[in-house]
Amino acid sequence: MNLHGKDIKIFTANSNPKVANQIAHELGLPIGMSSVETFSDGEIQVSIKESVRGSDVFVVQSTSDPVNNHLMELLIMIDAFKRASAGRITAVIPYFGYARQDRKARARDPISAKLVADLITVAGADRLLTMDLHAAQIQGFFNIPLDHLLGVPLLAPYFKEKFCKEEDDIVIVSPDLGSVTRARNFANRVDASIAIVDKRRQRANVSEVVSIIGDVKDKTVVLVDDMIDTAGTLCNASVALCEKGGAKEVYACATHGVLSGPAIERIEKSPIKELVLLDTIALPQDKLIDKITLLPVAPVFAQAIERIYADKPVSPLFN
């Protein structure tokens, strides 16, 4: 692939090489030759083993656990490409870490998402491609173009096909007030009604369900969120939907499966029959329990990369 005098190259660091290889395969390209290693003292060494002079470079790296290591790998790789005279550098970040620290919730709080945006820009990235930022306003933290893909167009067709004979019995549920827009978008795609779980958060990763807004009695419900971290909100909501709302069955889906701490244990014990996630974050084998289904993001990222390279709009992918 070679347009307007520049060739295209896909590179990866260590957070999600499987997705990077799938993206390269979708584009009919080899993965770029590079290595990212760690010295015994924890310092990261990056080696780019082919010329990138004048190339349109896309470096794929989710800033997932261990977040700081993967962030530093990304920054150092971008710096390496910049110093090697790459024509344009696009950071492809399927999962953007630190996205939940997007505002000052208390006095003297940092806005870490803004700091990370500055670091990526200063390192030398010319553009950023990501999916389902936890807070949409983070797009404004960057002074470079940012393309923001959505997970709903990938998740909704899975459930539309799964429940194609039971459409009247499906209710799409937002696990909190902040996810209502996402749930409504999802519901429009599967022709279903919506409900909202009203929760109160006492502190980080701890929440309590107060009430359910909407009718879920004897319905099959699908909880829709952008990410699942410790799964406390998700599992509390699933219990409340069954016990308070009288739901028949509970399914759930999210773009990002962080699944830290007690998440897997909670999901296994919850009423959730199936949890559908996108593979923006690489999950270790011990977290791939029977309840979890992974859907690939590589096809949509490959289409987005192809459009960015050809200077075409990315917005058609939202449909």
Image: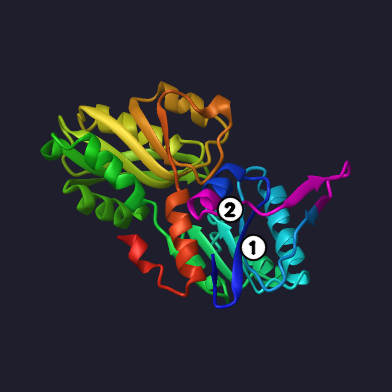
Which disc is residue 116 wearing?
1
Answer with the quarter of the image where residue 4 lies. bottom right
CB contact under 8 Å: marks 2 and 1: yes
Viewer-nearest residue: 50 or 302? 50
Q: Residues within 10 Å of mark 1 (few under 14, many from 20)?
A: some
Residue 132 in view of the camera? no
Q: How crowded is mark 2: few (under 14 residues within 10 Å), some or many (20 or more)?
A: many
Residue type at tag 2:
Gly
**Magenta region includes residue 32:** yes
Q: How many labels does the image show?
A: 2
Horizontal side of residue 31 vs 85, given as left or right: left
Residue 251 to residue 45: above or below: above
The image shows residue 200 at horizontal and vertical percentages of 39, 45
The image shows residue 35 at horizontal and vertical percentages of 76, 49
Residue topped by disc 2: 97
SS under mark 1: helix
Quadrant of the rendering where the N terminus is positioned: bottom right
Viewer-nearest residue: 16 or 52? 52
Residue 148 to residue 260: above or below: below
Residue 200 in view of the camera? yes
SS under mark 2: loop
Quadrant of the rendering where the C terminus is positioned: bottom left
Residue type at tag 1:
Val
Residue placed furthest toward the left: 168
What's the magenta region? 23-45
